[in-house]
Amino acid sequence: MAKPLSTLMGVLLLHNSIGLAAAVAAPAAATRAAGAVPCSPSLYEALRAVPDDVAQVQPVACKVELTRNDLVMTDLAFIGEKASGASLDCHGGIIGISGRPPRGAPPTIQISSVRGEDGKWSVPHDIAIRNCKIYGSIRIMGLGPNGESDNVRQSSLNRNHTEVAQAAAPYGIVLDNLTIVADGPMPLYVSPGVTKVTLTHSVITGVSKGSGIYLDAETARNVISGNHFDIRTKNREVLAVDGSAYNVIENNSFMNPEYGGIFLFRNCGQWGTVRHQTPQHNRIADNKFIYQGISNPRPAIWMNANQPWQSFYCDEDPPTPFGSGADNRSFADNNTIINNVIVGADGKLIRDQGQHNILTGNGAKPK
């Protein structure tokens, strides 16, 4: 049975007052696949039914196989270790309802860690979502939904924050052959500490108030490959690499990224959170940026992107001997940017304001 949103989010935010020391359970050895069993007939009935309350969220901890004629109007949540090994294959079916979601609505699909009464985090991993058309958004989160949440801020005051955030966050998430149609919220948000997400062979479209994809602080080793971005953003770049490292972004196409394509930066200080990891050791290769009728676009790729709002936040975190508490600079260095093509605009839209970045084979070509 689907659970009301208030109940589900209460579980996700359980025991926020518990200290973070010793609060992270070690990742499961050899990926014990708790959710790798077929779903029950009753769950299929719930997924295919018209929900009594659109605020309901259906927990999923099993393997779902839909048909191309299925329409699931209930938001879905893969929560904790018990969801590990679960999967959703829509076979062309639809998740979500077309149209602008109400303010404060949950993501269409969320994959979330949850902290238990003992203070340890139960972490979902090795989850696959394939062959779906999704109206709305996907959010993958561990310590908190974004860099300003209480658990993230508390953890950031410790020197080992990156390790703590990554140990508490989902990993091994496969997103393949999806069409995500945004209408307000960012279509894919990879929250602090999440690692090893792959987005492949997918289309990101619609309208976003923010970016198209956000790789938030302390995330790492994600792969974004073979996707097509045809999304309108509101004054934001399509793909934000905010303090995220060791990612591979390759063979994607970006249609009219007027406000920016791929920006590498590190946010600083916002809501008192110290940002630790820097956007380094990323590989950005063989991407195509296509411009039609855009007269003055922002950079297609920008190392150390100057975000105009950052100066308002940089002094909000406390002084620390590490991270943005010690130095507000982004340090988008040691990245590899190769063989990226700009069509219909100036090749100078690839901008390097970092150090020791490798740039080769990039440039413009005729339409």
Image (cartoon, helix red, strand yellow):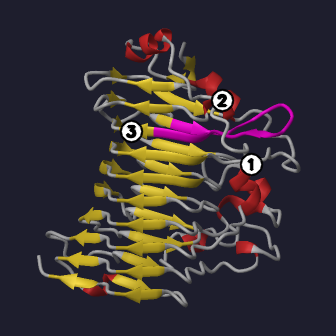
**Residue 143 position within the rendered picture, expressed as x and y whole percent measured from the top left:** 70, 47
Return the residue at label 3.
130
Relative to 53, say whether 325 is above or below: below
- Check if residue 119 falls in the magenta segment: yes
Task: Estimate the x, y position of residue 2 in percent, counting from the top left.
Answer: 53, 16
Q: Residues within 10 Å of mark 3 (few under 14, many from 20)?
A: many
Q: CA distance from mark 3 to mark 2?
A: 20 Å
Pick whichever of labels 2 and 1 is earlier in the sequence.
2
Amino acid type for the residue under numbered disc 3: Arg
Q: Was residue 138 drawn as part of the magenta stretch in this picture?
A: no
Name the residue rendered at 32%, 63% in the picture. Answer: 252
- Which numbered tag is attached to residue 82? 2
Residue stretch rendered in magenta on the structure: 110-128
Q: Is residue 348 above or below residue 310?
A: below
N-terminal of the pair, mark 3 or mark 1, is 3
Q: Is residue 156 in view from this perspective? A: no
Query: Which amino acid type is marked by label 1?
Result: Asn
Q: x, y percentage for residue 298?
A: 33, 75
Q: Quadrant of the N terminus?
A: top right
From the image, tell me which residue sits under label 1.
151
Front-most of residues 231 and 249? 249
- Distance between the Cα atoms at labels 3 and 1? 31 Å
